[in-house]
Image: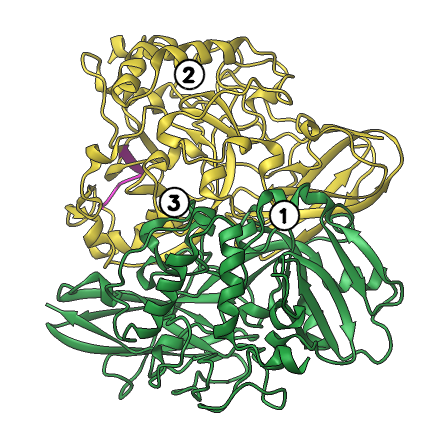
Chain colours: A yellow, B green
Amino acid sequence: MTNSLKISRRNLLGATVGLMAAAGLNPKSAQAQAAASVTAPAAAPATPAAKPLPGYVSWKHADSMIVHTPTTIETKRSAIGSSIITPNDRLFIRNNLPAPSAADIGDVNAWQVNIEGVGKPQTLSIADLKQMGYETMATVLQCSGNGRGLFAGKPSGTKWQTGAAGCVMWAGVPVRAVIQALGGVATGMVYMTSTGGEKLPEGIDPNAVIVERSVPLAAMQDAMLAWEMNGEPMPLAHGGPLRLIVPGYSGVNNIKYIKRLAFTKEQTQAAIQKTGYRLSPVGEKGDPSQPAVWAMDAKSWVTSPAPDNGPVKAGALQIMGVAMGGSDDIAKVDVSLDGGKTWQAARLVGPDLGKYAWRQFVLATNLKAGQYDVSCRATTKAGVEQVAQSTENTGGYLNSGWVAHTIKIDVA
Amino acid sequence: MTNSLKISRRNLLGATVGLMAAAGLNPKSAQAQAAASVTAPAAAPATPAAKPLPGYVSWKHADSMIVHTPTTIETKRSAIGSSIITPNDRLFIRNNLPAPSAADIGDVNAWQVNIEGVGKPQTLSIADLKQMGYETMATVLQCSGNGRGLFAGKPSGTKWQTGAAGCVMWAGVPVRAVIQALGGVATGMVYMTSTGGEKLPEGIDPNAVIVERSVPLAAMQDAMLAWEMNGEPMPLAHGGPLRLIVPGYSGVNNIKYIKRLAFTKEQTQAAIQKTGYRLSPVGEKGDPSQPAVWAMDAKSWVTSPAPDNGPVKAGALQIMGVAMGGSDDIAKVDVSLDGGKTWQAARLVGPDLGKYAWRQFVLATNLKAGQYDVSCRATTKAGVEQVAQSTENTGGYLNSGWVAHTIKIDVA
């Protein structure tokens, strides 16, 4: 273990590059892009260098996406539409390891997941799961590092702005239905630990690279084993054929190509859990004593007008955005045109897709020429207000502060 | 007028073919396909001849679609997923005239619509409309002829089964917000009459071919001028850049590329309203005295298992489907495994997207080997029960009878 823990994320790049080559990606360009994204100034999102979509997601809508690297692809702030659900071809990509190919997967319905730490452990295929229960649920899928590029200290990692997030409609079987059929969770288990089916590079301690995450047992209650995403069989690029959805928890906890769902007494020893994805004080390395990156906070941001769309015409203006409550319904969203000095209540629009989805909001206003600092601030039903500033951390995780998400709009 | 009314739909095909050639489609193959669809037995949907997608919708998911003709493309029964919303690339196509090209449209935000029959008639661009109001709404979009292929008498026209329908999330401005800004509906108006922006063939009375429909004024209340469909700018193939959405009303009333929205004392004289889309007694031609094809009825159908997916394995089985209330919420759906002799209550699943959307339902059952006649029957909140049989009519419109929608499932 000790050795493997010393392998930094940077050193892992070599192994990842090999996998990417195997997956038909261009590792050279990936490395160059990864380097570029590290040196790019955080304030440059409005005019990103246009990089082409990698082949495995060539079906994405190119004009809506910002390609940071082949495995980190962001939705432009202005490309989040007004229809609540983020279409598959506009949803961000963030894969810790390259996605498997269709050949790797084979027959989708034969994909198997081992269920462990239950009364009657069992290996189940997707075909089995499809007859064990059925639910449809909308959740915000948000990369743990979404907003990293808006932290003042410029933490290393992909400089996501707002676009490593989308609202997705999933269909699958509730985890609790599966567990119930298998005799319930074994006594004394504290975590739900899930393992992704990525191919691991050889010659490295698997714990250094495996995508395996533990979340508190309570997260099982609304979790789902999902095989459908927005009405289509789950794309491999997004974790198909089977993905664990843990509503309210950030992206990394929603295990792709899940091959093992276990109830455990301890958190996994995988580096991605033990030292990775921790809320570490700035300058300190990840450590199991620090809080894990799990539940998401209340957060909101403006999607239109977007700064990259250029000046806005003076006069009537609809300011629109999205607001999420983490694991609670949105009660209200306030919008400020002066950087938070004064606030006006926005109107929530569109169907309410539940506490794990986001809500759209709109403020109809009328602006004279000038520059405006536009902020928004969500409040949940339980009365939790979006924070002004998230505590910065080494990994740049879970940035939900409204100050950092404030945008300047030029009205001409 | 008199002359134009004598032009039958069959005679119009010549004009349409010319337009199709102009739009880059293959009119020969279209004619052949139209002829083929007329002579195909109604019971043959499970194994349709695979025709390629026409170029203007080459982005559709080919395996999910049945191409009847280049302008009539159906979603396979089994391709309706479990995520409520029908993705754009799986939504049916039914265009009365070929869709305009991007070159025809030019700058999307400059597209104009004339608003007439209001206090202050005005021409508004999409850019104008975008600042007048904003709403998001899910509706069932269903071709007036969906289910035509399930009528016993085999009415002429495309033999749609269940797949000329989808549930779509629209975004745009409520018509009532626009009308309010323009001084309200002028006194004495009874209908909302809308005109599509299709290019019309020359040398024919425009009224014979123009897509112009009148609906009762009350339909304005929840109607929308929509520029977005499922999170993407409205595709031209589906009526972009601007489409009128009349919730609860069948497809033809949801005018594509709308260029005129007028409040009128009379229904339009266009053939598509005057004689077309009428509930005419079988054998009789359309006539203004007959009911217009307007509001949709309560209806439901099974989507999984689908007959075209082959035999089902004996044992646990989730029977799934969709149910719409027309303009009312779904209160319950019952499923029968014996062709309607006995019924069991299905479970409604997933978020409720409102009274104009459809609801998903599921019945968890356990079946021994054998053949089952699977029916489903929706009931709305107001207590309206899906009819057993719709009255057949010359055009084969609005077939919502549960008997005709019964499917046979082979369990092996």
Residue A329 rendering spot, x and y as whole percentages: 57, 50
Judged from the image, the secondary structure of the residue bearing numbered disc 1 is strand
* Mark 1 surroundings: few (<14), some (14-19) or many (≥20) residues within 10 A: many
Q: What segment carries the magenta color?
A: A186-195
Mark 1 belongs to chain: A
Chain of the residue where label 2 is placed in the rendered structure: A
Amino acid bearing label 2: Gly
**Which residue: 15% across, 49% down?**
A120
Instruction: Name the residue carrying label 1.
Output: A360
Identify the disc placed on residue A218.
Answer: 3
Using the image, tell me which numbered label, if any, was put on residue A286.
2
**Which of marks 3 and 2 precedes in the sequence?**
3
* Residue B206 pos. (x, y %): 66, 68
Q: Are marks 1 and 3 on the same chain?
A: yes
Going by the numbered disc 1, the residue's amino acid type is Gln
- Where A115 sits versus B66, above or below? above
Cα distance between the residues tagged 1 and 2: 35 Å
Identity of the residue drawn at 65% across and 54% down:
B242
